[in-house]
Amino acid sequence: MADILPFLKSLISVSGLSGHETPVADLITEKWRPLVDELSLSRVGSLHGLKKGRGQEPRPSLMIAAHMDAIGMRVSKIEDGFLHITNVGGIDVRVLPGAPVTVHASGSDDELPGVVAMPPARFLPESAGDGVLTINYLLVDTGLLPRDVDKKVRVGDLISFANDPMELAGEVISGHSLDNRASVAALTVCLEELQNKPHVWDVWAVATVQEEVSFLGSYSSAFELRPQMAIVVDGTFGKGPGANGWQTFPLAKGVGLCIGPNMHPFLHERLKSLAEQLEIPWFLDVTPGQSGTDAFAVQTTAEGIPTALVEYPLRYMHTPVESVAVKDIQRVGRLLAEFIVSLEADFVDRIIWD
Amino acid sequence: MPTFGSAQLKLLEKLCNVIAVSGDESEVRKLVLEEVKPHADELKVDVMGNVLATKFGTGKNKRRMRVMLDAHMDEVGFMIVADDGEGLYRFETVGGIDVRHLVGKQILVGKDYSPAVIGGKPIHLMNGEERTRKVPLDALRIDTGLSGKAKVGDRAGFATKFRRVGPSILSKSIDDRIGVATLIELFRQAPPTIDLCAAFSVQEEIGLRGAKVAAQYFNPDIAIAVDSTPANDMPLYDGGENISYNTKLGLGPAIYIADGSTLHDPRLVRFLAETAEAEGIPYQFRQPGGGGTDSGAIQRSLAGIPTVSVSVPHRYTHSPISISRVDDWKNTINLLYAALRRITPELIAPR
């Protein structure tokens, strides 16, 4: 199996915040171009890669989808060279003070490095407290003089996390935006696996936009491509410090196969038996309600699409030090590929409820 | 004035990028010894781990002033106190660190700088109230990965790297590597009129402990602690005037008048201000208030030592990234360079 780590590291070394995914879309385009037969962008910026199957036309198609957008920040006001900020997506404000960031300054050719600053309590209203400060009290400092900040930065400019990827012991990769770039890497593993494996179905590999905000990419791509089935890939909660409940799963111990209202039980069963047959370790992740993933959006598109959710555990979700075991990413990619290979031309007709 | 440029910034970068948590200053000590050895008449590493370097003057005057310059080598950081297994470790902070700076940060652990992170519970798994509470230290872990080999007793520090940006430096540990770099520069160009005693001291962040011993060894006539002090020069939330900024970036070296424990020698305060005025070097007085530097320990050593403190201002103290202005540093070097050349015994003569 090809080493996916270098590509994954490149994916988490760029920004690509929700609604502004171009930097990461460009990287994925370059990587996928030789792996697919057709590659295009949707109207709203999602990347569609078509890997054609060998079945007779009209061929059924499976969409494998992962969102490529990331959470971050945006400039809300400029004051004396300091940037007031607001969130893009569900940012965790606890991680912000002292975080290295990149200001994507629209009035400058260069990206500006900066840091999130936490003002002393005496500069804030008493109601701000001495606990976690809400985002409206935090500032970003670029180290530039106020007059240069005024020239380069505008309200609305994006701010992304800037820390480099870090390789931890035991083949764990850590960094920002692994949610959900690690899934993009898993899709890539799948496409690489498929290069030498014949499959009947067409495969749409889709990197969606704006999952963290509105599921815009998955709604629109599912509608446009109208696949017969879909598998969404996303991270689930890794077991670790502060996270030991039933929703959490240990790193490097396998792939998560999700059940719940957003997922079709028939697809789940097929994935489960396939994982067992291939001796790919897996765990059951139960999602009693909204899965909080693109699967939620895809399922109800058009006349409804049978959808599965495949996951890997990710520690410290929505922090800049999200961590995943590379092995789990490779397992997800392999399971997807084997699932695709296993699809008979009439599989979709066999999907039954009871 | 001494030359100032890329060589000085390169030195500061090297000093900032190593980790030397209080009590384990060896990484900085090695760099300091390398730099001062060629210029020192006497050089020793004492029991505490201080680097004590002397450069004797050559002037013919019998009574040369012994002038001590101090900068601390240590930084705030972490020490591993328990192994929870599977690459997770409990830790304590060393020195004053606001726990709110820790969640979601990259750090380096141990002598081999093993990469690690301090993570946090996902926001999705917290209720509204929990999201507003700061995570207490005992709920945090250093995570080295699934097969980390850190040991109880290992030190750790922030992993952020030194950067030059426009007029500024963004780095961890500007406090007080910028003082260490300043001392190295001044020691290389010591004037012949004084005996220059450079103390690269340990354990400042946990109670000014190295400087006390250094002062007792040198027994200087006067001492200057060279450190870095917070600049809280940011806007107030309600748009009001910031009257407690401590110092401001860009206004030059900050001369201490009084801090939490020490009244700085008024003769030396005046002397530094007059030197700056005469040489046309920008300077500012640090707002009198709390805090402290090694000057507190030095002043109260032996029979009492006339002491003053000069700091390069930095924003965001004891956090993963502080910000200082290159010009403030340059002007700090220039001020001290000029001051060393103007020092005479009359400066502290009894009236």
Image (cartoon, coloured by chain):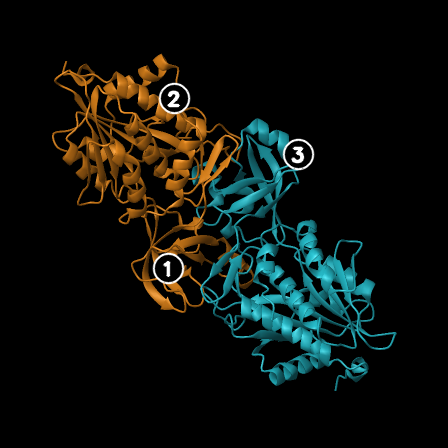
Chain colours: A cyan, B orange
Residue at mark 3:
A107
Q: Which amino acid does label 1 sit on?
A: Asp
Find the distance from the CA under tag 1 to the CA under tag 2.
42 Å
In this rendering, the answer to whether A29 lies above or below A287 is above
Find the distance from the CA under tag 3 to the CA under tag 1.
44 Å
Which of the 4 quarters of the picture holds residue A120?
top left
Residue at mark 2:
B283
Depth order, front residue of B102/B241: B102
Residue A241 x/y as whole percent:
44, 64
- Where disc 3 sits, the SS reads loop
Q: What residue type is labelled 2?
A: Tyr
Residue A23 x/y as whole percent:
67, 50
Residue B184 x/y as whole percent:
31, 32
Callout 2: chain: B
Q: Is residue A225 left or right of residue B2?
A: right
- Where disc 2 sits, the SS reads loop
* Image marks 3 and 1: residues in contact by CB distance under 8 Å: no
Question: Which circle marks residue B138 in the picture?
Answer: 1
Residue A76 x/y as whole percent:
62, 40
Depth order, front residue of A19/A123: A19
- Where disc 1 sits, the SS reads helix
Q: Residues within 10 Å of mark 2 (few under 14, many from 20)?
A: many
